[in-house]
Amino acid sequence: MRKVINLQMEFWKKDIANIEFDLQSRDEIPKLLMGLQHIYRTEPIRKKVFEVLKQIVPKKSQETGRPGMDLWKILVLGTLRLNCNWDYDKVHEIANNHSKLREMLGHSKTDFGCQYPLQTIRDNIALLTPPILDEINQVVVKAGHGIISKKKGPELRGSCDSFVVETDVHYPTDANLLFDAMRKIISLIAIICSEIGITDWRQSHHNITKIKCLLRGIQKLRRSKSKDERKKEERENLIAAEHQKYIDVCQGFVFRSKETIRILREMMTLSTFQNIRLSTIEEYIRHAERQIDQIYRRTVLDEKIPHEEKVFSIFEQHTEWISKGKAGVPQELGLKVCVLKDQFGFILHHLVMEQQTDDKVAVDMTQGAKDRFENLSGCSFDKGFYTPGNRGQLANILDYIIMPKKGRLSAKDKQIEHSEKFIESRRKHSAVESSINALENHGLDRCLDHGVHGFKRYVALSVLARNIQILGHLLQQKELKRQKRRRAA
């Protein structure tokens, strides 16, 4: 049985709405907690957020079964993790020892009996989904707009741009990706054999070390820079021979693992978990065979491997090789994320781009933001989003569009882009870089969650946490101004 939070107060606990914060603090934690406090103590906002949070678990689980972590606590810990760019170990420590945070979670200062296990925090934050976080984000942004302007729905002017969120992977080469696959094949199959008493893979650690030594030998090889063609040819033959030796050893372990899997399946005594693990091993075998093929073609047959055939991580397979042309950054490994912010700094909408370029998402981003916030009247883009079709479609969605044209300008385009309004909006467009930098500093420099679903959840949680922090900052500045006026009077 899960609750959003127990609203029934107890004598030794402090009401979340009455928690006091240091208004002079410039740290992100008080700002985030003040934003969360505003959500909690403003009843219309609280009701909306709590209704969304109830979607995390099925209705049957809300009334039956053992108590789980309160949904409010999941939201608090999830946003704190991303806003402060912490790992789960840091969240675990702070959740059990930070007095203000524990008050926000519904504990008293002396209530140290309730401690949060690390795995409990991990499992519960993983319950949040991108659609749920997107719905909460809409409520938070509208709450922020209500603080900024007393009018119902101030006119919004957006700015849209994309950036790369890196996945947590090492630099990929076909040789080290093969080692990754072989390491997992040997270690996982050794675990199963050990559990059922088969001794064929008892030297698994030695086998992995043997493959790693071959890999290190390959990585130390360098192509000859000599002008003597004979020496160049000798070095090329040596490189090909060492790679051939490496893939021969790996191929031998692949054949051996396939034979072991066949024997294990014929035994018909494996548990469900062991069968799942065998399926995982077979997936790694497919990765290994692909890498063996690519290494052989590249080094022995001297072929050039097409980009579309390459995989850049066997663990985070959604990882893309992205070259944006930044100075000093030849490539980034991850996925592009497109964000659309308003003039107040709130992120109105975001989109994780899988195998997409900027010009392919311009219309979807704008339409998505317009559906969520009807008072969005205009938006600015950079040249990467331009196509003639995009400009025409966006003109039907918003009142005005600032989208510089690629290439040579016609007389009509010159008139548009040299207008005072266009130039002013172009100058203000760079403010979106500030929002992107803030997101990167608060969690979106590198995604630490696994899988494409975890990646999307990580991005959505970071956007929500950033917007709650902005909400808290507005409340903090408003209260400071009120106190200043009171002292002046």
Image (spheres, rainbow, N blue to C red):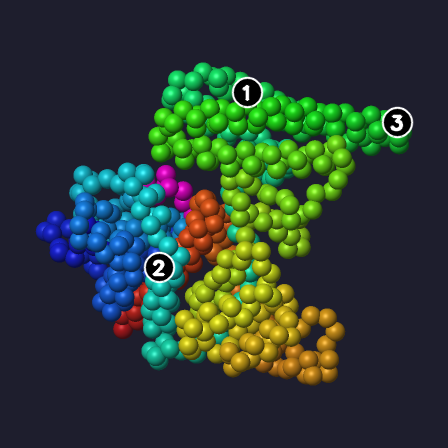
Q: Earlier in the sequence, mark 1 or mark 3?
A: 1
Front of the two marks 1 and 2? 1
Q: Is residue 420 left or right of residue 56?
A: right
- Numbered range of the magenta stretch: 85-93
Estimate the spatial distance between the alpha carbons at disc 1 and disc 3, rounded to whole Å: 36 Å
Estimate the spatial distance between the alpha carbons at disc 3 and disc 2, rounded to whole Å: 65 Å
Q: Is residue 18 left or right of residue 339?
A: left
Q: Identify the residue under disc 3.
A: 230
Disc 3 on helix, strand or loop?
A: helix
Residue 325 lies, with reference to residue 295, above or below; the image says below
Q: Is residue 90 found inside the magenta-colored segment of the image? A: yes
Identify the residue shown where x is 69% and y is 83%: 412
Q: Quadrant of residue 240?
A: top right
Q: Identify the residue under disc 2.
A: 132
Disc 2 on helix, strand or loop?
A: helix
Q: Earlier in the sequence, mark 1 or mark 2?
A: 2
Q: Identify the residue under disc 1.
A: 207
Q: Earlier in the sequence, mark 3 or mark 2?
A: 2
Identify the residue shown where x is 20% and y is 41%: 114
Q: Is residue 55 left or right of residue 460?
A: left
- Quick check: can you spot residue 29? no
Around disc 3, counting alpha carbons within 10 Å, would you say few (fewer than 14), some (14 to 19), or many (20 or more)? few
Estimate the spatial distance between the alpha carbons at disc 1 and disc 2, rounded to whole Å: 46 Å
Pinpoint residue 269: horizontal percent, then vertical percent.
36, 26
| Mark 1 and mark 3 residues within 8 Å of each other at the beta carbon | no
